[in-house]
Amino acid sequence: PRDPRETYSDEPSNQDNWQAGFTGNASWDMPFFANNGVFSDMRTMLVGGYHETQQSEIFDVDQTNSPTSYFDRATRSKQGSIEAFVERPDVSNVDFKAGVYYFHEIVETSYCFDASGTAPNTDLAADQSLTNDSIAGYASGGYRLLDNVKLKGGVRYSLEKKKADQDNTRYIT
């Protein structure tokens, strides 16, 4: 016989996950600056990516052999970014890199708590949306003073906008 203090569930909790994404880059060595002092050996690059995740899960909250309360959650997350820069790698006394970056993310989540066992004929639900947009510009550079001494510095400016929306609803059925 089972220990009565153990929990039991006829319908086990479950979770589904799905993910997909890609990334890529393209670069170009700029030949028209080939032998032009500080601007020789320059390269431009574009880097981007996208990622999406979906999750859904249902939990038997009361853990009895006659489940009456469930918690249901579904989340969808999307992220994308792109970066473009120009650089001169460390091949002589001077090197630098300058570029721009953009990132966008949105996360949408829905919750539902079917509390019919604890509060008869009542469901509680919430929808939530989080958005993040970020843009940045940056530059860095270095100058070789001696063979083993280099002076480096850089700057970055970022601007972020974050937004959250939530809708809480109580359903009486």
Image (cartoon, helix red, strand yellow):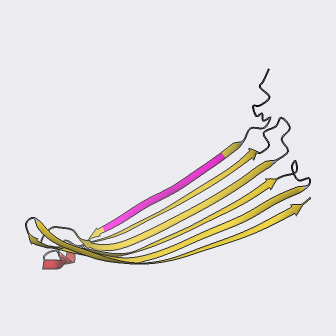
Q: Report if residue 36 is visible in the image.
A: no
Measured as percent of width and height from the top left, residue 50 is found at 50, 62
Q: Is residue 123 above or below residue 16?
A: below
Q: Is residue 2 above or below residue 104?
A: above
Tell me, yes or no, whether the highlighted magenta stretch contains residue 146: no
Measured as percent of width and height from the top left, residue 156 is found at 36, 77
Apparent side of residue 96 relative to residue 92 in the rendered image (left or right): right
The answer to which of 24 and 106 lies nearer the viewer is 106
Taken as a whole, is the magenta stretch helix, strand or loop? strand
Rendered residue at 83%/41% (across/down)? 67
Rendered residue at 61%/74% (across/down)? 163
The magenta segment is 16-27
Q: Quadrant of the N terminus?
A: top right
Count of all numbered marks drawn on residues in the image: 0
Apparent side of residue 115 relative to residue 136 in the rendered image (left or right): right
Q: Quadrant of the C terminus?
A: bottom right
Q: Residue furthest top?
A: 1
Rendered residue at 84%/52% (across/down)? 115
The answer to which of 121 and 143 lies nearer the viewer is 121
Apparent side of residue 121 relative to residue 4 in the rendered image (left or right): right
Q: Report if residue 124 is visible in the image.
A: yes
Q: Residue furthest front?
A: 5
Quarter assignment of residue 85: bottom left
Q: Residue furthest left?
A: 146
Tell me, yes or no, whether the highlighted magenta stretch contains residue 21: yes
Measured as percent of width and height from the top left, residue 61 is found at 77, 45
Rendered residue at 72%/60% (across/down)? 110
Measured as percent of width and height from the top left, residue 7 is found at 76, 34
